[in-house]
Image (cartoon, helix red, strand yellow):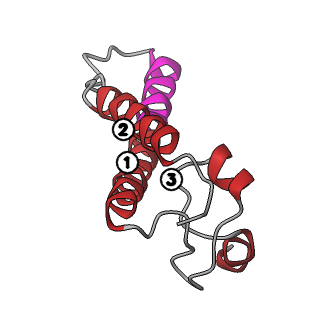
Amino acid sequence: MIAGFDTDAARAALVLERERLLGELGEPIEGPGQMTYGSQAAAATHVFEQQRDLAMRDHMRIQLHQVETALSNLDNGTYGLCRECGKPIALERLQAIPWVQLCIDDARKAR
């Protein structure tokens, strides 16, 4: 863990983000409903929006896992350490993205 880092503030931010994600993931995605002939453009738009919503949910699930991992790391004393190299993650990076698990160098390598 990083010396001088406010773990209470980090925990509060992580819990808030977890609640937000759980709330959004709990909302249903609308089905296509009944289509009529001549509404191909509307059907295509709806399918696009549904696929976008599903992709966003996948992203939210990944982020939720990262948030829960960060909370676990706070509990076990490894919060703020890069999961690849084990070095401390920059304080500014943790403040911007409290659930981040890679230092900037390893994040660049992962791209």
| Secondary element type, mark 1 | helix
- What residue span does the magenta drawing correspond to? 39-53
Q: Which residue is mark 2?
A: 18
The residue that appears at 36% across and 53% down in the rendered structure is 71
Residue 69 drawn in magenta: no
The residue that appears at 36% across and 38% down in the rendered structure is 18
The numbered dot on residue 100 is none
- Given contact means CB atoms under 8 Å apart, are the residues at marks 1 and 3 in contact? no
At label 1, the amino acid type is Leu
> Could you say which quadrant of the image residue 73 lies in?
bottom left
The C terminus, quarter of image: bottom right
Q: Which residue is mark 1?
A: 64
Q: Disc 3 versus disc 2: distance between alpha carbons?
A: 10 Å
Q: Disc 1 versus disc 3: distance between alpha carbons?
A: 9 Å
Total marks shown come to 3
The residue that appears at 71% across and 80% down in the rendered structure is 109
At label 2, the amino acid type is Arg
Indicate whether 42 appears above or below 103: above
- Given contact means CB atoms under 8 Å apart, are the residues at marks 2 and 1 in contact? yes
